[in-house]
Amino acid sequence: MDFVINALPLYWEGALLTIRLTLFGAVLAFVLAVVVGTLGTVRNRTARAVAMVYTEVFRGVAALVLLYWFGYSFVEITGFRLTTEFAAILALGLNIGAYGAEVVRSSINAVPRAQTEAAVALNMTWWRRTRLVVFPQAWAQMLPTFGNLVIELMKATAIVSILGLTDLTKVANDFRASAVADTFTVYAVALVGYFLFAQVLIVLVRLLERRANRKLGRPTDDSLLGLLRPPSIGTTTGGAR
């Protein structure tokens, strides 16, 4: 117990880096997912080709390899050295963003065609019908999967120590190597830290889901317990009722 109390400041510093990488990586992944996923639904072949190339390349490359590439190979090609933290954010954001792009594309395509045709009949521009008709419904559908992807991104930050970053896992590894405590205790503290952070992310995503479904006129569970449990199997995720 004394070890845990004395080591908490160092664990906290590592956790702050983990949180920072997760948040910035998630922002990058979200922007890429929305832009590329939307490009994958337009009629322009060039735009769809760009979306396909990005998605297939960065889904097919391991995040670990991307970390090595941005951390060590990028400088050899461009002559410009990225900071280790920025390299980690790029690698994780590009990797998770490729998975998110497929989520966005499939969610947009899942919106009932009749609603898009009705928006066209009302003489709405592509931007207006996407913003007002298509995306609000697709947003409610893509949120649960986005939540899973953000948690996967958070867990992927555990490998950034290969670039010399001291995240939560690196702190635990350093304690284990110095033999100041038994291995079980060292990694149990890290495990609890990751678990608590994941629960916070889950609650935030549930709040966004609740807000999105309420805007579409769908029933929501407004209880505190509803933030901790997944939506029921019968919950509608397609077009608005």
Image (tube, helix red, strand yellow):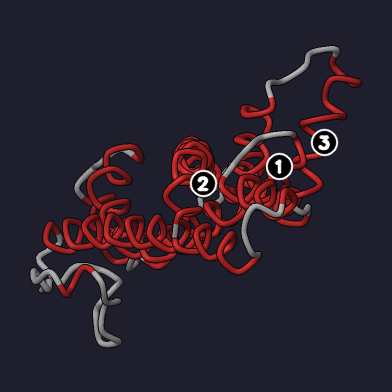
- Give whichever of 9, 60 is nearer the camera: 9
Callout 2 environment at 10 Å: few (<14), some (14 to 19), or many (20+)?
A: many
Q: Which residue is mark 2?
A: 33
Which quadrant is home to the C terminus? bottom left
Q: Residue at x 55, y 43 (%)?
A: 36
In the displayed orientation, state which residue is furthest to the front: 2
- Give whichever of 6, 236 is nearer the camera: 6
Residue 77: image location, x then y, percent: 89, 21
Question: Is 116 left, or right, of 17 in this rendering?
Answer: left
Q: Amino acid at mark 1?
A: Ser
Give me the C-alpha separation between circle 3 and circle 2. Answer: 21 Å
Q: Which residue is mark 3?
A: 69
Specify which label sits upstream in the sequence, 1 or 2: 2
Q: Residue at x 72, y 20 (%)?
A: 82
Nearer mark to the viewer, of 3 and 1: 1
In the displayed orientation, state which residue is furthest to the bottom: 234
